[in-house]
Amino acid sequence: MININLSSLIQRLHPLAKTALEDAAALAVAEKATEVQIEHYLLSLLERPNSDFDVLLSHFDCSENLLRQSVRSCLDSDARGNGSKPVFSALLIEWLQESWLVSSLDLSEPQIRSGALLLTLVSNPLRYGQHGYAELLSSVSPDSLKRNFTDLTSHSIEAQVASSEKTEAREAGSALSQFTTDFTGKARNGEIDPVFCRDHEIRQIVDILARRRKNNPIAVGEPGVGKTAVVEGLALKIVQGEVPDNLKGVELYGLDMGLLQAGASVKGEFEKRLNAVLEEVKSSPTPIILFIDEAHTLVGGGNQAGGSDAANLLKPALARGEVKTIAATTWSEYKKYFEKDPALARRFQLVKLDEPSPEQAALIIRGLRPAYEKSHNVYVRDDAITAAAALSARYISGRQLPDKAIDVLDTACARVNISLNAVPAPIETLRQTLAAQQRELDALERDALQQTGDKHSLATIPDLKQSMEVTKEDLKVLDTQWQKECNHIEEMIALRTRLHELIEGTDESQEKAQATPENDNTDESSALTRRWTRSKFV
């Protein structure tokens, strides 16, 4: 029997079945029972008209009145007098667990309906039912109920709710839309940044995908070198038609192992989800390539007691060429998982992704510059790009280019954007210092009026006032400088906006603009940068 958290199990109950369980617990409390038993739950379910339970009992000519009397007599014979809160009986929990299996695997229902509870009960009457009412339920055929469940319960209120939920699920999409990300769709919508300096690796992946057999590349590199970016670059090339004929028109989906595993605590649920994705990939009229990031999670993914991991489920499809995949992982994980499983390793062809040089990282960031300028509403100079690449490579250890260089530039852009609207840190510090000095002065003057202060402390009042005057003067200087620089920045932004308008307007303006930043704006920007990076502002 599976082992699942009780609270998670209750969340999987249909709202009607959940309400019935709450009423069953209330009944057990009212009767001072030591446990909430199956019989309490049955009595509560029998009070739900037009439920699956009610409709099915009527169909199989099982008298609800006789069943209610028999269940009640079983409860009357149990011991009572419990002064504390009753707990759910172990048999009731086991019944709910098996009903969840029946619902998900046999009935393909997303929730535990009362009909699934009845099916579990009549399938194991000697285990879950007592002798008296188990005989009354013998008229309910488990095989017929399982085979015709949808038709038999089509008029119940639970079926109507389930039907609306299934319609919403269909509208939400298939297994692919639930557990994958559409990379080609994002590329068409302009949601993927351009990829630079990875043409060689993309060509390697295309060559491997074009093979007849063993056509599953695996990109291996340290974190941050751009493994996912290479796949995004391939998606861009597919959308732009810059791939061989056998790859034109294909769709590239990223498999999310986290979504596949989330909530799949029941045995068989993970395998069911993964198989649904694979079946949709195989049956799709448009060829689909699956991208599996963090591919080492395949090994052991979904592997519970008696279950198979994702790698074993994928191996047959990969060997027969039914599914094309692109995997990505790090060197340490590749050696730990793939090299120790030759059967899995030989189904993938290795594509090495080395860390780019600072010069290559600068080229990559130059390609991404428009996206960051638009996002942060700032102007990014080229020397800032080269500095981000060179300085991050020199001083930031434990991370790889271009990821760390991009993060440095992103943070710098965010800081500049904030500085255009927020008070600079040095000014804020002086304001806080002045406020603290004022509070200290007020306290000392109060003590002086009351003649209760320490003479040595009161003697510091003149020095404190002098210090406050110095702080006010420094604050005034910085405030004036800040306002001037804000005005200067506004003028520069206006000039740059006008310059871009001229560039877009005429070719002649574009030729003039090529020299303008060199002669005018560069000196002004350099001066502005020097002022903002003076020691008092750091």
Image: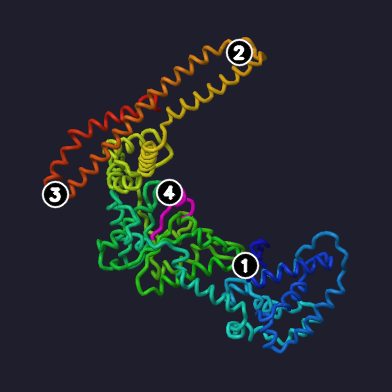
The magenta-colored residue range is 326-338
Mark 4 vs 3: CB contact within 8 A: no
- Where disc 3 sits, the SS reads loop
Between discs 2 and 3, the one toward the N terminus: 2
Picture coordinates of residue 382, whole percent (x, y): 26, 38
Q: Mark 2 against mark 1, which lies toward the viewer? A: 2
Q: Name the residue under label 1.
A: 12
Rendering coords of residue 16 (x, y %): 66, 73
User: Which residue type carries mark 1?
Assistant: Arg
Quarter where residue 237 is shown: bottom left
**Quadrant where the C terminus is found in the figure:** top left
SS at mark 1 in the image: loop
Q: Which of the two labelled residues, at mark 4 and mark 1, occupies the earlier sequence position? A: 1
Residue 494 sits in quarter:
top left
The image shows residue 505, relative to residue 161, as above or below, that is above
Residue at image position (60%, 71%) is 111
Q: In this view, does 370 lie to the left or right of 346?
A: left
Residue mark closest to the camera, 3 vs 1 = 3
* Gap in angstroms between the C-alphas marked 4 and 1: 40 Å
Q: Is residue 336 magenta?
A: yes
* Residue on which disc 3 sits: 506
**4 or 3: mark nearer the eye:** 3
Separation of marks 2 and 3 at Cα, in angstroms: 72 Å
Quadrant of the rendered image containing residue 350:
bottom left
- What residue is disc 4 on? 331
Please, what secondary structure does the residue beneath circle 4 have? helix
Q: Crowding near pointer 3: few (<14 within 10 Å), some, many (20+)? A: few
User: Mark 3 touching mark 1, by CB under 8 A?
Assistant: no
Circles 4, 1 touching at the beta carbon (< 8 Å): no
